[in-house]
Every structure is written in structure tokens, then in C-alpha cells.
Image (cartoon, helix red, strand yellow):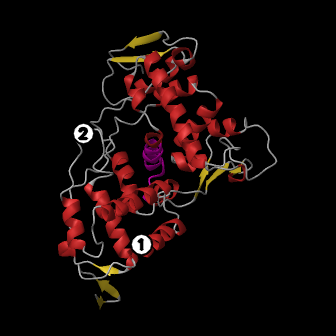
Amino acid sequence: MSATDGKTTVSAETPSVNIQQGLLDFLEWMRDTNKDKDTITERMKILNRLIEKGLNLYDYKAVFKVITNLVREKDPSKPLEGGTKQQWKQAYMQFTKFMGWAIPDRDVPRFKVNRYKISPYDLPTPHEIDCLLARANFEQRLAILIWRDTGATREEAAWIQRKDIDFERRIIAINHAVKGHDSRLIPMTSDLYATLRELPPSTDPEAYIFDPKNPYRDVVTANLYKRFWNLRKRVAKNTNNPKINQIHPHLLRHGFGVEGAEELGNPYDVKYFMGHKSMSSTDIYTRLARSKGPNDLIVEFAFTPERTRYFVKKASTTLKRASFPTDARVLCGAKRSHGEVGSLELDTYPT
């Protein structure tokens, strides 16, 4: 073991007597720095798996060799022995950084990372969200509006308290930020404001808006998603729209980011409202907002003939056919799964 620029260069000969204490200190450090609970669990599980394989964590070459040779289990639907190679490397590298160990860059393996990509066609349309809202109960409707109109994650929504809601200024605070996000203040939309006003009265400012009697917020988070999953499955079947079955809370957050990038224009404002630590995360949404060129296909829904005429005047290419449901509630309501759809055939624009 030798010191290099204040760090410790490790080797296979370095004694491992303090590894267990180092893992405990690493666990406390992640908790103190407000790391996401799932991230903490995943990284501690990976480090313990490395020890179970008989590895000395000081011997980074042996550790990287094992990580490089990880293979999938026989069942392809199962994860790669508890995570991808990149996740195993990230867990080990963060631990070595916490311990102050110096590992030469040339010895760190490089793995191909399949980053999550967002397509404009993956984002839910207003019509699809209206179908979900029309069949949702109060709790489901409130959760959907918070995910859609504040960009909060599932975990952040479950931690919102009464004191985080300012009805006078119409602002909602996201204070329990997770996954490295920053706290932020979000203006309420009229839909969200009206729904929050329907909450039962409470004199406790510390009370949560979702399942206030349950102290285990991770359980509340899981229950919110499970109920939303059942709702979207039912709505997708009744409306014969399988795309609704692909909507998830984080996709609503993506929609919030793209809409913010289109309306605000300033990427630093988008970064604040999304709670991003780095502009590289915000760039995903600004690029999507800029991707809508004059030759792109833009699909919008008109619920009234007047709205249809507005789209006709707004369009820059010849409109061959415009369709609109007679009423969004009739189309998506609980009593009728399908509504009448009127169509307007136009060959020329009205002047």
C-alpha cells in the first residue's frame, strides 16, 4: 500500500482486515448523503456478492476480472446476477472512491452501456392521459396529476406532505428529492390545484397526502404504482389502445420535461424544475423539444369542431382528414368504453 496524491494505491497484498468496517462506513455515508434506498440496497448487495465469491476487495484486478466474466442466468428474463456489469463496476468504483483508493484508469474495464432513450412517440398523448383520469379514483387521479404536472418521481410523490402545498401562491414543493435530484418549487396547474383542494381537511402539517397513516413510505410508493398498473391495464383493454398499457409514472415525468423544454426555452429553467444535478440529464429533454422540425409529424387531438378548425388554420400542409371525439368523457368514461367519433373531410382550408 502506498500513498499517491493523498490516495491509497491498492494491490492484492494489501490486508483486508478493515473491509467489513469499511463496508459499514460506506453504508452510513450513502445514508447520510441521501442516496436513494434502492441504490443503497443494490450497491451493498453487489459488494457482498463480491465478498461471497471469495474476492479480496483490495485486489481490484481480480474484482474486475470477475465482473468482466459475469454471464446471464439460464432464464434471460432475470437480471445479470443482480445487475448489469456496469452496475457492478459502479458499485465497486464508488466504494473504492469512498475508501480513498487510487486505481489506474488503464485498469478500469469499459462496458457498453445501453442508455434509456426517449422517443417523442413513446410519450403519452393528452387524450391517453384523459382516458386514465376519467376512470381513476381520487387517489389515482391525484397521483397521475402530480407525476404529470410536477415531474415528481414515484418516491417523491409519496413523500409530499401538507406543509409542502401552498394554496395561496399555488406552489407545491418537492422536498424529499431522490436519486440525486434537487429540491424545487413547482407552480400548480389548474387541474392539480382543484384536485388538491378536494383532500380531506387535516390540522397536521406533517401529514402525507398519500396514505398518511402508513409510516413506511416505500410501501406507499409500491402501492401507488401497483394501483396505477391495474388502472392502465383496465383502461388499455376497455379503450382497445395497447399503448396505454406502456405508460408508467416516469414516462409522465419525461412528458413534463419535454413540455417544459418547449415552453420555457431556457435549459437552466428546465434543469431546475426537473431537479437535475447535471445539465447532461436536461439535454435529453431539450434535444427532444428541438427535434420537432417542419417535416415532423405532429399528432394532436381536437375534442370540438371549433378546435378542429383551429388546427386546420394552424397547419402548414394540406389536411386530408381530421377526426375528433364528440366528448372526451364519453369516449373514456367509466360507463362507456367507446364513444362516437365524428370526422371532418377537408380538401382546402377555410378562409
Q: Looking at the image, which is closer to me, 63 or 90?
A: 63
* Quadrant assignment, res 100: bottom left
Q: Is residue 218 visible?
A: yes
Picture mark count: 2
Which sits earlier in the primary sequence, circle 2 or circle 1? 1
Q: Nearer the viewer, residue 322 or 201?
A: 201
Q: Position of residue 83 (x, y in %)?
A: 32, 52
Q: Nearer the viewer, residue 307 or 242?
A: 242
Q: Position of residue 1 (x, y in %)?
A: 28, 87
Residue lying at 39% horizontally and 60% vertically, measured from the top left? 43
Q: Quadrant of residue 322?
A: top left
* Residue with the mark numbered 1: 20
Position above or below: 323 against 53: above
Residue annotated with mark 2: 76
**Residue at (58%, 12%) from the top-left corner?**
335
In the image, the segment drawn in magenta is 253-267
